[in-house]
Amino acid sequence: MENFLEPLNRILVAVRDIGAHGGLMFQAHPSAETRQAGRELSEAADRFFNEFRVNEAIYRAVQSIDLVGADRETIVGVEKLLRDMRRAGVELVPVRRKQVVELANQIDRDSNEFAANIASSNRAVAAESSDALRGLPPDFLSSHSPGADGRIRISTKYPDLFPVMSYAADPELRRRLLHEFLNVAFPENLPVLDQLLGDRREFVRLLGYADYAQYAVEDKMTGRPQVVAEFLDRIAQLLDAPAKVDLARLLARKRKDLPGADELEDWDGRLWPGGYYATKIREEEYGVDMRRVREYLPYPAVRDGLFDLCRELFGLTFRPHTETPLWHPSVEAYDVERNGVPIGRCYFDFVPRPGKFNHAAQFDVRTGVIGSGLPQGALLCNFLSEQAPREHVRMEYRDVVTFFHEFGHLLHHLLSGDGRWLYTTMGFAEWDFIEAPSQLFEEWARDPATLARFARNPDTGETMPADLVARLKKSEAVGRAYGVLRQVFLATLSLEIYLRDPKGLDTSRLFREVYEKRLGVPYNPEYHWITSFGHLTGYSAIYYTYLWSAVIARDLLTPFEAKGSLTDRATAERYVTEVLAPGGSRPAAELVRRFLGRDYTFDAYERWVLAGTTSS
């Protein structure tokens, strides 16, 4: 084992880390040339793994390893390695192995092209005057000055999009900006998606699967597409009536402004929670002005409050790292210690720019395996306006929740980074569990005691009032049922598009059909949302992961709730030990069972998702 498996593991970790570095530069570097070089490096690493997984000589050598007396982590690592190779086609005849490798390489190129087209999109609208920006927060207005032509540019990047869709009193501005946002990477990504679907279908056909969904789900907690479909139907049936109530509530509020209104438009807030009329309801029925909330959330205070929380919960310390040149002046780097012992490094890249990944995610930079370096991870998000100095930037509350979500992934990565084998790291946990720790950590952003630590207006020194914090938490239930149903729609689409035969498939039509079936409202044919749905590449058929993991996360929260505090150190330590630290060395269901002392159930999730559907 020492003469074969350990050297092999070091090689695999090294190549994975090289690919991760390339992938990060592809997604984040300001130079187009460097982004292209990063893409090529990432694809080279992918080609190595695609060839490695079908190497019959290595496969037979791994099969011959005597595991008698080996520890469980080693046994699991070897089993996962062999399974990965079988699923890649190592047991096929040579000519078929060559075909699947060529297809796997092409799929990587398809996926990267899809992502690059989204990142390079530069869509925007122009407001003719500041009057069109009525309702937007003062700090937003001060950072959006008219250009030489007297008009104000509003982009589809999140620091512009979310405030406009939440606060802009001008419905025409909201309509135009939403139209641009839902046409990002159109039309260029339609043929790329068709190519990707076709290549994946042929890839799994050669491997003996009926469709790509069957292949994608096989090694997840669910195991079969039918289990996923039944799970999504269960949530849809639970939320069908409450979601209609949500829409009726928004329409009733719109009629206060427009008494003759007979319809709720997408730009009124129908597409996602936190839209214009949901924001109005939170203000008028709950006393929560989200613009006022924003005043208490300057980025430096949110970040430092998060660090303080992690010190109390997990014994973590974040020290600024300034020795290494970074890819952009706005990027921050921190060395992380736990109880005085170095455990890794993290990077924050939060300012939008041309060519950068335009969503929010945690990217591995270094895997973190004993003998191969400490784990490193980067958060690529788009919270902070490039027009305002960082110390003055206010965050939308939804962005604070997203920050905590992505930081939950980072914690999982850092706190599981001392395992022995690549195939037992966090990256090889079941993907439909991987969002559970991140969704759990969102709850600290919703916890009044946690918000009280850092929610402070730097201009006045005033801490966010306790009654406002309490009302904020309660108001989060506004539109929740419909918002979750929207996730059911996206999950259904991601499953359905990979169940279908791509030959002759009209993906835009399928998107519209699933949208209207799940949400019960018409889909605007001028939108091409599918061309910017980036999860169709990496997550492929398993976007349901977010909902499946949310069920687990709500139950993982219950031991903290039983203690009456989300900052109970003993519970947090046990959570790290039983859930985070093992990475992918144990089945996810076992990790959860060890922490809860029982199997997880749907109960806590059902209580949460239905909360507030009839009260204010």
Image (cartoon, rainbow, N blue to C red):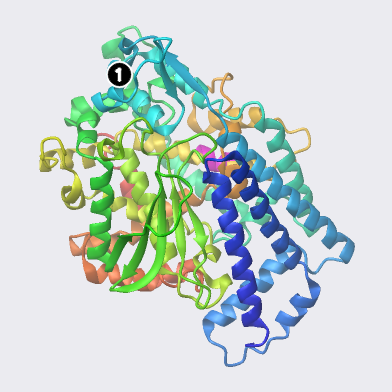
Q: Residues within 10 Å of mark 1 (few under 14, many from 20)?
A: some
Quarter of the figure with the C terminus: top left
Q: Amino acid at mark 1?
A: Ala
Residue 437 picture location, percent across and down: 39, 59
Please identify the residue farthest to the bottom as the structure is shown.
Answer: 69
Quarter of the figure with the N terminus: bottom right
Nearest the eye: 91 or 348: 348
Residue appearing at x 60%, y 45% in the figure: 34
Residue 96 picture location, percent across and down: 86, 60
Relative horizontal placement of residue 461, taking residue 547 as reference (left or right): left
**Is residue 126 depicted above or below 392 in this figure?**
above
**Is residue 203 depicted above or below 134 in this figure?**
below
Residue 133 picture location, percent across and down: 32, 16
Nearest the eye: 485 or 44: 44
Please identify the residue farthest to the top as the structure is shown.
Answer: 260
Residue appearing at x 36%, y 71% in the figure: 342
Magenta stretch contains residue 163: no
Please identify the residue farthest to the right as the structure is shown.
Answer: 95
Residue 138 picture location, percent across and down: 24, 24
Snapshot quadrant of residue 347: bottom left
**Is residue 324 depicted above or below 140 in this figure?**
below
Nearest the eye: 196 or 134: 134
Q: Secondary structure at mark 1?
A: helix
Instruction: Please say whether residue 426 is visible from this viewpoint.
Output: yes
Residue appearing at x 58%, y 52% in the figure: 23
Q: Which residue is mark 1?
A: 252
Magenta stretch contains residue 492: yes
Instruction: Please say whether residue 540 is visible from this viewpoint.
Output: no
Overall secondary structure of the magenta section? helix
Q: Which residues are magenta?
A: 489-493
Residue appearing at x 19%, y 38% in the figure: 296
